[in-house]
Image (tube, helix red, strand yellow):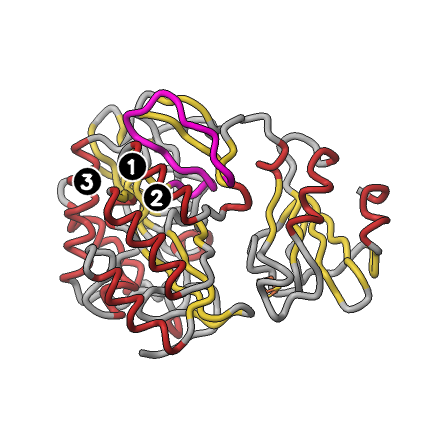
Amino acid sequence: MSMVRGWCPGALRPMESGDGWVVRIRPRGGRLDAAQAQAIADAAEAHGNGIIELTGRANLQLRGVTPATHAPLIAALRAHDLIDADIAAETRRNVMVTPFADAETDALAAALEAALARSRLTLPAKFGFAVDTGPAPVLTSDPADIRIERGPQGLLLRADGMTRATLLHDVRDALDLAQWFLDQGGAPEGRGRMAALVADGPRPAATLPAPAPLAPFHPGLVPQGVLTGIEFGQIPPDALRRLARLGPLRLTPWRMLLVQGVRTLPAMAGLIPDARDPRLRLRACPGMPACPRALAQTRPVALGLAELVPQDAVLHVSGCAKGCGWPRAADITLTATPEGFDLIRHGRAADPAALRGLHPDQLPKVL
Ligand code: SF4
């Protein structure tokens, strides 16, 4: 087992973080049955620190895993078909699936995952695919390099960053586009993304207009079931077990889970059922005391400020400059330092601060 530092951990190749190893699980097709959800909840408690996070690529990650618990964790997950054959296959099988998948989409995603597992493509760790073939795309704002969508003409294949697509005849077309990306020099030194390549470089042939995406979703009823928000993107193990007993689960990249086939959900700690709930605007890493690198508590601070965050804005409170809880820019980021909180506007946790060394009592005023 090898270790990487950075932002793309897997299950077989975890990432070291302040609170131990982060192990990322890629459920096949973005779905979990009851037994898989139970296994993940049990494994998070037995072999990690009990934290289960939903990622921005619709994966799950467990935190607080140690060198001693990693092997039994992998064995427990492998028994439920949650682990790939090897690190290379795990890295390639970077496929995000619309949570509103129908049977055709599920079959397409399974075929793509199988083709990627068989292929010998060596793609950058962050290079990913989106199978977004519901009635309209819903993943266009979420990270993917090659997108499969649905248009009036049929299934479409689109390179990220382009507004034109081609017809998709077979999932191998998607792998051919990935090979084109490599052939064009899109991944010098093993890093690179499709949108950057096509921005000012070569473009694959494409003539069909991309379909218009749907507006962002919020917690509530959808035709397939109920979407529930997850507080801080972390689902308590008990809530995961209880939700999975109600119906099959679909993962989303939006800090929400879709429980299929239900019309309502019982109240549970850690779930946000209401689209107007201000907690949906908050991001925070585990902070103190969960993470030994943390310089302050994060979640209590964020919850205390929730009502002050304007609708549609994002407040990120980070226990240190690593920014594990939200590795993107937020409207306001509060980063804990030895001198107090730094306030960053429209940036990430490590970006230059507009205000420095704020005491928690000052935060409501400056926000
Ligand atoms: S950002 Fe948070 S979880 Fe990550 S190392 Fe810093 S304190 Fe720990």
Residue 94 located left or right of residue 268 = left
Are the two marked residues, 3 and 1, in contact with CB atoms closer than 8 angstroms? no
| Residue carrying label 1 | 245
Are the two marked residues, 1 and 2, in contact with CB atoms closer than 8 angstroms? yes
Can residue 134 be seen here? yes
Q: Nearer the viewer, residue 327 or 221?
A: 221
Q: Is residue 261 magenta?
A: yes
Locate residue 198, reporting x and y percent. 40, 52
Please tell me which of labels 3 and 1 falls first in the chain: 3
Residues under labels 3 and 1: Cα distance? 37 Å
Q: Ligand 1 closer than 8 Å to the CB at disc 2?
A: no
User: Which kind of residue does numbered mark 3 sit on?
Assistant: Leu
Disc number for residue 168:
3
Q: Nearer the viewer, residue 3 or 213?
A: 3
Can residue 207 be seen here? no
Q: Quadrant of residue 84?
A: bottom left
| Residue carrying label 2 | 241
- Determine whether 32 is above or below 123 in the image: above
Q: Nearer the viewer, residue 214 or 360?
A: 360
Locate residue 8, reporting x and y percent. 42, 64
- Determine whether 331 is above or below 322 in the image: above
Q: Quadrant of residue 240?
A: top left
Are the two marked residues, 3 and 2, in contact with CB atoms closer than 8 angstroms? no
User: Which kind of residue does numbered mark 2 sit on?
Assistant: Arg
Q: Where are the magenta residues, as a range?
A: 252-270
Q: Nearer the viewer, mark 3 or mark 1?
A: 1
Neighbour tally class for label 2: few under 14, some 14-19, many 20 plus, Cα within 10 Å? many
